Amino acid sequence: MRSRSLAAVALIFAMLSGCTCGGGEKEAKKGPAPSELLKSLPRAAVSRPTALVPKAVLSSPRSMVVAAAEARGTWDAFMKTAPGKALVEGRALEHVSLSAQMERALSLSHDLASASEHPLAADRLAEALSGPAAIGVADNDDEDADLLLVKEVDGSQEFVVRLALMASTLKGFGVSTEQHEGHPLHKLRRGTRILHVAAFQNVLIASTDEKLARAALSLALGKGGESVESVAGYKKEVDKLQGHRLAALMSLEPDGPPALLLGLSQLALGLDVDSGQMQLGGELADSPDTVAAFRALAYVPKDAVLFSSLGAANAEVFLERLGGSGGNSAEEMRKALVLPKELEDALTDEAFYGLLGVSDTRFNHLLGLGLKDSAAAAKAFPKLAKNWLDEPEKQDIAPGISSFCNSTGGLCLALAKDYLLAATDLESLTAAVEAGLGKRPALSDVKGFQQVGKSGDTRFLTAYVDTARAADAMLTFFRAVGQGQSQGFDTGDVDASVAPLCEAMKKLPPYGGGLAVDGTVVAGQFQPLPVQQ
């Protein structure tokens, strides 16, 4: 897991799991009630957590924001769900608790408590996260990710009040205070760790980055700035926050698969923890000219690990994106890929990908490109095989359908009625052809999936994952790596760490769903499907 993703998990886990990570075992000394002490602080003009997360958090790829209307309650509800139980049974959270990112999160919490006149007892920190909260994780390339916590303060919740009071009364060694827009901003330094804190009667702000802390403070004071709520797709999810629901926003790498294949730069996500339904949305760089009808289910074997179909896979646009990062045009990329123009003209805008399984350390991939002119594609197909394959070997795999495979393996091509198919091995290619001919079960036979991925729909994206098979594939891969390669671990390590999580994941249902497109906005949902027999 990348350090920024683990940083987010570690921070959430540290705050909500009831860990003993505050300072000391005793509450603050007797005196005025915390709620009375807190009244000495000014009130923020804006206290809604997501409205105080600066959009600058997302300025670098792989950064994210997660928000909840009831942070502690949502965590507790998640731990009672099947995925939550799987993480516990699979000891995934145990491994997070031992990570360097977790150690950093715990250290920051301890630093805050040890420097305060009113420290919060260690076993009360989780209760202090009751109510609305937002967490931002800003990628910092080679350095630790920068963290931002915004917690709305409800005067009726004792430990939430105590958390704000603890943050507002920092003093002593390593503590300095500056005024920002007329409000105190505390800086706490412990060795190389730095935390910037600002507290109001109604909201608390804490960040490891000074610029983010100042920007959040300006938003709280109503002094201007742009928050993540300016992202329209995310604001829609934030407006739905109630009960046990999460809203997340992620910035994506410009040269990563979502950007190259889909044209997405950001992804908004809403998760209803109780039902398991996941709302997804995002904004495209350009509105697709056309969205092809969805036909791919019939060509993907039913026992696939995962599947995704794109209804706006325009070849010209994809080649432009592919070449954009290197300053190349679509024509230059077409020449580099030795792609026959006659074949490109015969394609629709539908493309699909399937992971059919894992053999040792080799992934069995399947790719399909939709055809609108099968006769033109048939004429260009031998040229494509000659361009792409080293000494292509022809083999009949079904009546009227021939495949061409690399003599050294690794790539096989076939032209079916509706698709140009490519696979990493002949067995996977044959399985797809037979599924398309109705000779073996396909994803169209998956119980419940037709309701969320109906053939003929003009949908931007459709996806499916068989969680149990994904767990098997992951375990197969890591065991093979442990046996045959020197990666610093062996099969014993795999059985102790990865295997419990995989076994727990096998109990989870498959998931499926899709995204529709309206102009440049994509939106849809993914949900649990019936367990397949």
Image: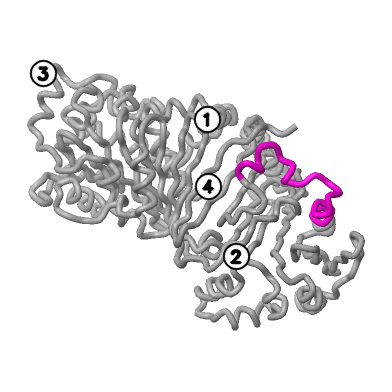
Give the camera-side residue of 132 and 241: 241
At a point 20% along the width and 49% down the height, the residue shown is 219
Could you tell me which secondary element the residue under label 3 belongs to? loop
Q: CA distance from mark 2 to mark 1?
A: 35 Å
Q: CA distance from mark 1 to mark 3?
A: 41 Å
Label disc, if present, on residue 31 of the rendered structure: 3
Quarter of the figure with residue 375: bottom right
- In the image, the segment drawn in magenta is 431-452
In the rendered structure, which disc, 1 or 3, sits on the residue that comes first in sequence?
3
Which quadrant is the C terminus positioned in?
top right
- The local secondary structure at tag 1 comes to helix
Q: Is residue 475 magenta?
A: no
Left or right? Give the position of 306 relative to 43.
right
Q: How busy is the neighbourhood of tag 3: few (under 14 within 10 Å), some, or many (20 plus)?
A: few
Q: Position of residue 397 (x, y in %)?
A: 90, 60
Residue indicated by mark 2: 313
Residue drawn 15% across and 37% down? 200
Between residues 88 and 488, which one lies in front from this camera angle?
88
Q: Is residue 76 left or right of residue 179?
A: right
Of pointers 2 and 1, the one earlier in the residue sequence: 1
The secondary element bearing badge 4 is classed as loop
